[in-house]
Image (tube, rainbow, N blue to C red):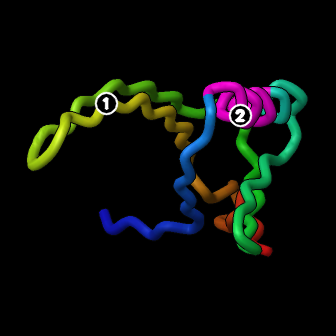
């Protein structure tokens, strides 16, 4: 299935800033509120449903240069409601 990137950002941050960003998303999820991602003038708001698939992955990438380790968190859900419309996405 083709993939369309709706929002992407990559910055180098200290652990405390990364933790604050993850905590902010966790607080929104816990409160049942929409999650807004924004950077460099781009913004997207997503309504994460009450139940979604949560994937955690640790990876090591090897190749030219030093190995790169990563932790990836992914929350995934179908983007259509019973009426066939997309209630979860708002691009600003």
* Residue 26 in the figure: left or right of residue 73: right
Q: Main secondary structure of the magenta part?
A: helix
Q: Quadrant of the N terminus?
A: bottom left
Using the image, tell me which numbered label, if any, was put on residue 69: 1
Quick one: SS at disc 2?
helix
Q: Is residue 50 visible?
A: no
Q: Quarter-wise, where is residue 8 in the image?
A: bottom right
Q: Quarter-wise, where is residue 4 in the image?
A: bottom left
Q: Nearer the viewer, residue 64 or 45?
A: 64
What residue lies at 84% left-to-right and 28% top-to-bottom? 27
Q: Nearer the viewer, residue 22 or 45?
A: 22
Location of residue 78 in the rendering, given as x and y in whole percent from the top left corner = 55, 50
Quick one: SS at disc 1?
strand
Location of residue 10 in the rendering, given as x and y in whole percent from the top left corner = 53, 55
* Residue 79 in the figure: left or right of residue 65: right
Q: Is residue 80 above or below residue 77?
A: below
* Residue 70 in the figure: left or right of residue 24: left
Q: Is residue 70 above or below residue 63?
A: above
Location of residue 32 in the rendering, given as x and y in whole percent from the top left corner = 86, 34
Residue at the spot of label 2: 17
Q: Which residues are magenta?
A: 15-26
What residue lies at 78% left-to-right and 47% top-to-bottom? 35
Residue 45 shown in magenta: no
Q: Nearer the viewer, residue 82 or 75?
A: 75
Cα distance, mark 1 to mark 2?
A: 19 Å
Location of residue 17 in the rendering, given as x and y in whole percent from the top left corner = 71, 34
Q: Is residue 6 above or below residue 18?
A: below
Q: Quadrant of the C terminus?
A: bottom right
């Amino acid at each position: 299935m083709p993939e369309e990137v709706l929002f992407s950002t990559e910055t180098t941050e200290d652990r405390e800033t990364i933790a604050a960003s993850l905590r902010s998303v966790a607080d929104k999820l816990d409160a049942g509120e929409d999650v807004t991602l924004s950077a460099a003038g781009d913004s997207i708001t997503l309504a994460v449903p009450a139940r979604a698939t949560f994937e955690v992955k640790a990876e090591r990438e090897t190749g030219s240069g030093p190995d790169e380790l990563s932790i990836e968190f992914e929350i995934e859900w179908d983007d259509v409601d019973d009426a066939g419309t997309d209630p979860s996405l708002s691009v600003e």
